[in-house]
Amino acid sequence: MEGLMSVDTFEDASDAVCELVMCTSVRGEPEQQMMPLVQLLVPAVMSLRPRFQAAAQQAQSQGGSEDDIEAVKGMARLFAELGESYVGLLAQASPDATQPVEAMLDVAAYPDQAISAISFNFWHHLMRRLTLPEHNAHVRRDVQIITSPSQDPAANTRSPEMQRRLDVFTPAFQRLVTVVAHNVQYPPDCHEWHQDEVQDFKQARYAIAEALEDAAEVLGWQRTLGLLLAPLQQLSTAFDWRVAEASLYCVRCIHKTALPAAEPLLLSLFGSLPSMPTNAGAGSLPYTVAILIGTYSDWLARTLKRGTQPSQGHGQSQGQLLVPQLLQLLMQLLEHTEASGAAASAIRNICHSCGRYLASSYLEGLMQLYQKVQGQGAAALTGAQKLAERDVLAITEGVTALVASLQGDSQASATQALLEPILGPLQGLLQQPHQNGAGPGQQAPGAGQQGNLEYIGALVDRLSTVFKRTTNASLAASNLAHCWPLLVRVLTQYSSSDRLAEKTGRAIKQGLQSSKTASAAMLPQVVETVAHQFQQSRQPCMLYIASELLKAYGADQQFQAPLGQLFSTLVVQALQGLQQLSGYDNNPDMADDTFLLISRGVRYSPGVVYNPQMLPIIVDAAMIGVLVQHRDACCSILSVLRRLHNTNDPDSEVRISNQQEQQLRAVMLQKDPLLVRILLGGALGALPKSRVDDIAAVFYDMLYVYRGEAYPWIVAALAAIPNQAATDADKHSFLKSAQDLASGIDNRWDIETALDDLSEVCRRNRHSEEAAVRSLLPLELYQACMPQGHQQTAGL
């Protein structure tokens, strides 16, 4: 430890002392037998405080050399390691805890934020020790109910000892808040920063935000809020946007704290926001104002709700005046280049949280905003200032959510008003796909074929948003029927665009989801369109429209015939391009969506799957495609195989009949011996290691259902693996777990662990892996999958 005093040996000595500190503690507590060493380590490390403080003062005034900074980092790391390793001891709030905690405050106050952040883990661990019951079990034996009111409800059930500890550490956490809140301020030269400097500063502020959350857990919302607003309250004479922005950012950080509705400090703060500058000289202040409003939308909703309760009196109606003012401010910030996105998100959040309280009084203003922004985004004239399309979608989503809170005819008429500015331009584009110029020096939105695609795609996305946020099923069905002819025209006219078809398919899916079974009258034309469009274009989006139909109507007997015909048509046509493993690898999206459709059929309409025509086709396709390298496609196929073996799956909405179960059993008993070999080949090397647990789940269901009939398949498959890949001893664990399961012993964990161990053995080198897979797979599958199996697939 003497090496800590020498510049030449400090780096090595600090590393050694850190290791010693870690060795003397377990889970934040010093080990009893190590206490003599602990009593030597703590004073040695604390003796570095004057040196650290001097370095901090020098860095504050003059900056420091690279060597000085490295030394400071070493000292900060020592203080932090000491604090984190002994946090349980420090949390007991004895007088000896003062100096280590003060050292951590010194680190938090260091001007370099990378060094300051070294302390944050300590404060988090200390917070947990002081506030969470599991860390205070040994001091809660004398719990007494405190009857005096407190700003923190949890304080009413704290023991006197817990409260004493919190009281001891309150000044330290108050100082922490003051120090780190200052560090979030933008420096005067921030306008000269490069992009990487901006990102570094943002990352540093994220870390500070977490530290402020921790401090608020200890101090409670009232103390923390008062400390954070203090700098803002001192700006009455000379306004500095950097100070104001920092305070607002910090207040945003503690929004998860249980802040009471209509809290006067917050009401005053939000009431002052419209008067803050939003011009070009205000820096990032407008952006932070918008983000703050959006973050506190739930608090604003609680405040509005309290104002509508007669028992709260007239004084609580401030929220009813405040929220419209904030919405007006956000509308102004939509014109601000940097703050427009945050303002759009905030409007969406307020509409979601406060919609039921605003619908009657502020609907007209928001509908005017909605009409205005429909000409922005992808619809804006070339060269004009415009909102981003994602911001238009955010406002569309928010206003639609507000409209959904209306009742009866008011909701229907307002929804119609939402659709008109979308359907009008969409119809015009479909009638005139090649638009002419809009005027001298300006180009119309959507001009040219590529422009048409982008504009139509944006309009369809907006339509999808309206469908998604419409909560009245009958109204959603009416909207879908009204828009259906245009959506079909989009699919037909632009059938060559997979991206536009995907967007249109998503809109139809959202309409079906929102309408539930209310769109039954449309079912014949939807079925006809989906079948025809898939036959013409083979677009996977048609498959998930069919999946939605199965979910909504699969259990209804009157729709079994059309849905069964649609299911068989789509699946057979989709599988025509998936007759070899290469087809799955080349078109994994089609494979994924096809087996998701099959899985939806098993769950909601088993009759479309469990029949002599479809079942053998599906099982054969799964046996070929299960070795596809694409993660989602492979998992979808494995999920289908699980469902085919586990007919008592609690997730299934419809139980299969005895006849269907007999048909399934006959097919699976015929196919499973080969399927076992293919699955085992995938687990031992043909598929990435991350699939082994999913394959084990299929084996579990197979053995659980077929018991003694399935066990010989496992025995035969394991016997085919040569000793070069795995010996009998290596196979024993998996064989034993399979035998136990076949005997009725439910041991899912055992079979997963055993298969994972066997996989590790066979994957130990390339030769053993190839030998195992070659012995199990049919030659065609082996040749198709193994060249890919040795690619870098671990992250798939």
Image (cartoon, helix red, strand yellow):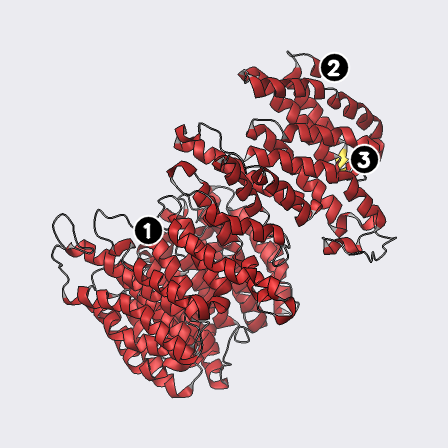
Q: Amino acid at mark 2?
A: Glu
Q: Is residue 163 left or right of residue 616?
A: right
Q: Amino acid at mark 1?
A: Ala
Q: CA distance from mark 2 to mark 1?
A: 61 Å
Q: CA distance from mark 3 to mark 2?
A: 24 Å
Q: Residue at x 46, y 62 (%)?
A: 351
Can see residue 623?
no
Q: Is residue 3 left or right of residue 637?
A: right
Secondary element at image label 1: loop
| Residue 230 image position (x, y, % from top left) | 61, 40
Secondary element at image label 3: loop
| Residue 428 image position (x, y, % from top left) | 18, 66
**Who is closer to the viewer here, 121 or 431?**
431
Badge 3 crowding class, 10 Å Cα cut-off, few under 14, some 14 to 19, many 20 or more, is some
User: Are the two marked residues, 2 and 1, in contact with CB atoms closer than 8 angstroms?
Assistant: no
Badge 1 crowding class, 10 Å Cα cut-off, few under 14, some 14 to 19, many 20 or more, is some
Mark closer to the observer (2, 1): 1
Q: Which residue is mark 2?
A: 2
Q: Amino acid at mark 3?
A: Glu
Q: Is residue 588 left or right of residue 699?
A: left
Instruction: Name the residue at the bottom extreme.
Output: 558
Badge 2 crowding class, 10 Å Cα cut-off, few under 14, some 14 to 19, many 20 or more, is few
Q: Is residue 617 left or right of residue 711?
A: left
Q: CA distance from mark 3 to mark 1?
A: 58 Å
Q: Which mark is residue 388?
A: 1
**Who is closer to the viewer here, 31 or 327?**
327
Q: Which mark is residue 31?
A: 3
